[in-house]
């Protein structure tokens, strides 16, 4: 009893009061492409990128493909690429994830009135890992810990697809998981939505070119929310969901 | 025991392949003599032939490589009957190359790769027969946020007679992909093979390409990588402790270990930008050295962590509910653990004295040793208690390195890594939090990779979980599974 009280006292208050205003020190988040011109013919950043997330003229980084590894930063001879700890990277539109010097930010998420009405007070999510590496899965798990505590916003991870309003999809979708993923989705009652978490789920880029993937599921069911990263910071997920549902923090 | 480096490298012409039966016979002889099988695998060769490779570790710690050459679909007498530790390797060899270990009692696909991807539902489960026997199938999708895998329990009444674990759902074809990309640009791919143990994988990969290219990285680089590995070990053991506490509804433990893990991975992020250490290690060096400010930051984090960690451990270990739930549950004897070739933490919790940080200490752990810890019980309690003790040992090691003023850990830019030596095989081993991560890279005549074999400790340890569950109940499965804390994607590749 006394030990339990002592542990409780040490635990103190751990939740992040306002996730939108959090400051994750050191996090390699949103890439920033500085002003200036590239040297003629230079493609060092493109060559350094392991997931073909960078295109030229102008230099643009697709956060749906980017694994935030930072390999391009030292590769650029002009020092034009850097990273900030901005974690507000989620988007409802796949194209909004492409950042460049003229378009430096991911488009802000617009609140969906329909989703807000339906799920604004309660959103139950079922997680399926279909070829994840346990990075995204651990970060999805972290959403419910005492720090991120999404339960306070009425958002929960549930065990049964029957209880779920949405699918949290991680992994690049392996052929061996196609059937189980579809069964789980079919088991979820309408209306339902898909949240694609991590570069694997969004674009499959870390494992692109593998014959062991079958991403057809995403052709049939487009995600409502894209949460980029490798793995995404839990704050990217939390704020993305709060934004699309219009939940104050 | 000398300070054997955790890397072996040899020109392939120095490893002339024997005939398949001769090679298998030599492997059996070494195993009879008490050698440990580090890895065993095959790759396709010209004319439809197959080159097999076995790496064995002798009593002196040294690793030796032996190779065989076989024609397509050739059979050889299975090693498994005499040495169960070979069972998973031979299954994988059969699945990946078609060579047949004749007399293997359990010849089934490991992960349903290639053409077998269409047939994962056809898995030939072991059958327990009898009028009152029933089977329970769970998965691939499970109730919590966890990777997919199928578990088939064969029960008589409440008692589980056998558990069969069928994996492959996470198979992404990583070994084939690694050959499609430039060999020096694989770091981020390697980091997501099993993304909760990225540092162990990245370090093993870096060490291999550095050996293959003759890049002389400094001891300060190796120290920073080892510090990264211990931070990863602390964080992932905490993840398991969180799960163990939560699975028995010991909520205060779950909440506290979860919070303590956040403190460690956020400290990792302040050093390298990622809570999982992604992007920290690169061939030729590290992208983030430890400046004195970062050392102070880490030391302060560890100091406040240690105090609270000891407090919550005391609460866990002295709670009667925890003891009654974990003691004697999921017990695996030392003999069984040894016979099936169990590795890493799970083996040490059954009293098997194995840790490649000791047996393959090299110059790094030779100068900065890590204590090899074991428990005797082999049950869920032992695996929980050993995680706590290993965290304490990692903290001690980290403090000792970070506090030593004579050690310069700043590190410069990574050294340029030149082309890889042609026709060379390199095997590297790093002791991740689950056990040894083994990576074998072979270059061809042009210095490009012709084979990249990846082996997660989970490949061997899943069978340990299956054995541990015998004579327990299905309700014991979640805590047994969490106490092993194995990787699905590391098995499935």
Image: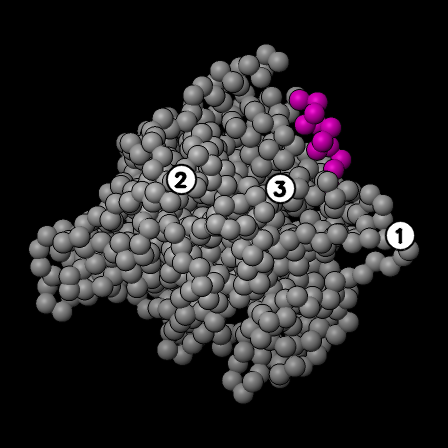
Q: Is residue B46 visible?
A: yes
Cα–Cα span, label 2 and label 1: 52 Å
Q: Residue at x 56, y 85 (%)?
A: B48
Write down the region rendered in magenta: B319-330
Nearer-the-camera pick, B443 or B457: B457
Asked if badges 3 and 2 are on one and the same chain, I answer: no
Q: Looking at the image, is mark 1 or mark 3 earlier in the sequence? A: 1
- Left or right of residue B372, residue B338 in this image: right
Residue at horizontal 50 percent and vertical 38 percent from the top? A156
Instruction: Give the percent coordinates (x, y) of residue B472.
Output: 78, 42
Seen at 10% across and 52% down, the residue is A35
Tell me the residue that label 2 is attached to. Answer: A117
Badge 1 local density, few (<14 within 10 Å), some, or many (20+)? Answer: few
Q: Is residue B329 magenta?
A: yes
- In this rendering, the answer to whether A246 lies above or below B5 is above
Label placed on residue B482: 3
Q: Nearer the viewer, mark 2 or mark 1?
A: 2
* Chain identifier of the residue bearing label 2 in the image: A
Left or right? Give the position of B328 relative to A101. Answer: right
Across and down, in percent, residue B175 comes to: 49, 67
Q: Residue B266: x and y, percent?
A: 38, 35
Between A222 and B396, the one lying in front of the other is A222
Q: Give the residue pinned by disc 1.
A: B132
Residue count near mark 3 (Cα–Cα under 10 Å), binned few <14, some 14–19, many ≥20: many
Which mark is in front, 3 or 2?
A: 2
Q: Residue at x 31, y 54 (%)?
A: A93
Q: Is residue B206 visible?
A: no
């Amino acid at each position: 009893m006394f030990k339990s009280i002592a542990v409780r006292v040490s635990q103190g208050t751990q939740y992040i009061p306002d996730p939108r205003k959090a400051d994750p020190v050191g996090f390699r988040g949103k890439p920033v492409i500085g002003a200036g011109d590239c040297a003629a013919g230079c493609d060092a950043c493109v060559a350094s990128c392991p997931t073909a997330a960078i295109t030229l003229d102008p230099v643009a980084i697709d956060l749906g493909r980017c694994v935030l590894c930072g390999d391009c930063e030292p590769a650029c001879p002009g020092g034009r690429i850097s990273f900030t700890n901005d974690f507000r990277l989620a988007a409802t539109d796949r194209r909004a994830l492409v950042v460049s010097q003229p378009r430096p930010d991911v488009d802000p998420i617009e609140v969906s009135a329909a989703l807000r009405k339906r799920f604004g007070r309660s959103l139950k999510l079922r997680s399926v890992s279909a070829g994840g590496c346990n990075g995204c899965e651990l970060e999805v798990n972290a959403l419910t810990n005492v720090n991120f505590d999404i339960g306070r916003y009425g958002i929960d991870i549930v065990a049964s697809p029957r209880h779920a309003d949405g699918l949290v999809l991680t992994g690049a979708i392996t052929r061996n998981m196609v059937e189980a993923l579809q069964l789980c989705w079919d088991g979820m009652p309408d209306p339902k939505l898909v949240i694609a978490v991590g570069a694997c789920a969004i674009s499959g880029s870390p494992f692109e070119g593998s014959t062991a993937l079958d991403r057809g599921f995403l052709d049939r069911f487009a995600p409502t929310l894209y949460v980029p990263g490798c793995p995404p910071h839990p704050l990217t997920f939390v704020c993305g969901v709060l934004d699309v549902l219009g939940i104050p923090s | 025991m000398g300070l054997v480096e955790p890397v072996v490298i040899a020109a392939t012409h120095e490893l002339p392949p024997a005939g398949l039966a001769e090679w298998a016979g030599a492997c059996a002889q070494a195993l009879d003599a008490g050698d440990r099988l580090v890895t065993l695998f095959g790759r396709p060769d010209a004319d439809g032939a197959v080159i097999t490779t076995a790496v064995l570790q002798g009593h002196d710690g040294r690793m030796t490589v032996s190779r065989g050459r076989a024609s397509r679909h050739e059979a050889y007498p299975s090693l498994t009957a005499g040495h169960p530790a070979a069972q998973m390797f031979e299954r994988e060899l059969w699945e990946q190359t078609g060579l047949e270990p004749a007399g293997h009692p359990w010849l089934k696909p490991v992960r349903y790769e290639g053409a077998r991807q269409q047939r994962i539902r056809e898995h030939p489960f072991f059958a327990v027969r009898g009028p009152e026997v029933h089977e329970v199938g769970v998965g691939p999708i499970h109730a919590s946020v966890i990777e997919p895998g199928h578990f088939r329990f064969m029960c008589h009444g409440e008692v589980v007679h056998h558990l069969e674990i069928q994996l492959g759902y996470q198979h992404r074809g990583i070994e084939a992909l690694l050959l499609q990309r430039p060999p020096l640009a694989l770091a981020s791919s390697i980091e997501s093979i099993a993304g909760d143990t990225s540092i162990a994988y990245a370090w093993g990969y870096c060490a291999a390409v550095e050996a293959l290219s003759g890049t002389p990285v400094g001891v300060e680089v190796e120290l920073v990588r080892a510090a990264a590995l211990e931070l990863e070990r602390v964080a992932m053991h905490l993840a398991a402790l969180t799960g163990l506490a939560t699975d028995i509804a010991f909520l205060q433990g779950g909440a506290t270990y979860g919070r303590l893990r956040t403190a460690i991975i956020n400290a990792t992020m302040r050093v390298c930008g990622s809570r999982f250490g992604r992007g920290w290690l690169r061939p030729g060096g590290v992208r983030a050295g430890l400046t004195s400010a970062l050392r102070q930051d880490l030391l302060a984090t560890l100091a406040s962590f240690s105090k609270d960690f000891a407090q919550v451990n005391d609460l866990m270990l002295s709670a009667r509910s925890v003891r009654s739930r974990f003691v004697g549950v999921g017990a695996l004897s030392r003999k069984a653990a040894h016979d099936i070739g169990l590795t890493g933490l799970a083996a040490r919790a059954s009293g098997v004295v194995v840790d490649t940080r000791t047996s393959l200490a090299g110059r790094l752990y030779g100068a900065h040793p890590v204590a090899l810890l074991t428990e005797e019980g082999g049950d869920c309690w032992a695996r929980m208690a050993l995680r706590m003790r290993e965290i304490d040992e990692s903290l001690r090691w980290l403090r000792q390195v970070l506090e030593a003023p004579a050690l310069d850990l700043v590190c410069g830019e990574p050294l340029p890594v030149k082309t890889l030596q042609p026709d060379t095989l390199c095997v590297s081993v790093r002791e991740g939090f689950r056990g040894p991560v083994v990576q074998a890279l072979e270059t061809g005549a042009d210095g490009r990779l012709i084979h990249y074999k990846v082996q997660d400790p989970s490949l061997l340890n899943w069978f340990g979980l299956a054995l541990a569950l015998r004579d327990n109940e299905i309700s014991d499965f979640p805590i047994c599974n969490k106490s092993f804390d194995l990787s699905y994607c590391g098995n499935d590749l």
